[in-house]
Image (cartoon, rainbow, N blue to C red):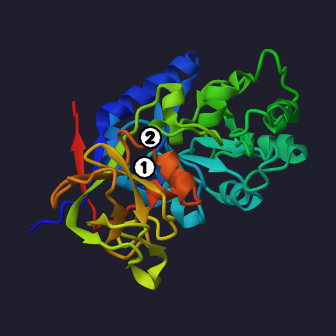
Amino acid sequence: MTRATRAVIDLAAFRHNLQISRQAAPHSKQLAIIKAHAYGHGMIHAAQALDEADGFGVAILEEAIALREAGISKPIILLEGFASAADLNLIRGYRLDCVIHHVSQVEILEQASGTPIPVWLKIDTGMHRLGFPPHQANEMYQRLMSCPAVQKPLRLMTHFANADDPDDNTTEQQIKTFYESFDFDAENGADCDCSLANSAGILGWPASHAQWVRPGIMLYGVTPFMHGTGKDYSLQPVMTLQAELIAVNRFNKGDAIGYGGSWICPEEMPIGVVAIGYGDGYPRHAQSGTPVLVNGQRCQIVGRVSMDMVTVDLRNQPNAEVGDEVILWGNGLPVEEVASSAGTIAYELLCGVTNRVRFEYINQV
């Protein structure tokens, strides 16, 4: 029998969420971020569903090549740029844009020849991860402008550290720092294309929109903020992770459930066994009480998550039977809520679904 564990990917939800981004930033081009296998959803399918985006952002060269070889023709930006001079021929051949964030990359370009490469110069305005400090911005800009291997005009980029917290003024300071790095007029903006806003910037910081925005987690139906869910912003979940009950058993008061006997039945009750576990990407650290939906009704995980199974308190679904549907997150159960119960973030849950899970893509155009 084929195991019923599957991730249902609603491609219409992708398209809907992109439109929410467009509505929030109507004067900006949309660079859809589909790195890490489109946050675990399937990169090629995501790119095809998001064909109204103005370009795509990925982390590594292999992701970009896979998109090109699948026939994706829109601009693709390597958010980490290149690692060595040996990458440049592939970047040219596959017509890729590069983010330049370190002096070693500038030096490689200064020594390079051949067709010029489209470049985004990244400024570290406070994230302190990648990018040039503001006091080096003009120098690096001039060096790249003088470089024959760089296509003109340059584009500029930064990344927000705290935009997920609407009460934190760090984002306002980062916007200010970005424009001051180049003596730009903060009111009128830059005289070249810039990109500042991630998903949180798009929805929460209109001053950051500039010429390009970079929707990421919001495309997958998830809130980019610390609290709430995507539904708060009319976003729709793209992934629904589903499984089935493979056993329903009754246990007595005092019976211990699962490894280590960490959960004790408070009364005689039904316990369901669901065909999913950490081998499928369901978080092992999900605590007893983490919600699931059984036949659309809320129930709770009890005991430890196993490699292939979880156990569920079925007192809210006493008539549940083997073969009944269980939703781990998605439609009707926000992944943000599950992540919070499991002590993690939605990004990790979505990216962590393994290749044991069968992916089904629905609502293709």
Element at label 2: helix
Which residue in the rendered view is the most extreme toward the right? 135
Q: Which image quadrant: the C terminus?
A: top left
Q: Which image quarter: residue 135?
A: top right
Q: Residues within 10 Å of mark 1 (few under 14, many from 20)?
A: many
Q: Which mark is residue 38?
A: 1
In the depicted view, which residue is nearer to us: 131 or 339? 339
Return the x and y of residue 125 as percentages of the image width and height: 81, 43
**Would you say the residues marked 2 and 1 are in contact, meaning their CB atoms lie under 8 Å apart?**
yes
In the depicted view, which residue is nearer to us: 28 or 271? 271
| Residue at 45%, 51% in the rendered image | 39
- The residue under label 2 is 220
Q: Which image quadrant: the N terminus?
A: bottom left
Work out whether mark 2 precedes mark 1 in sequence or the reverse, and give the earlier one.
1
Apparent side of residue 15 relative to residue 109 in the rendered image (left or right): left
Q: Which image quarter: residue 264?
A: bottom left
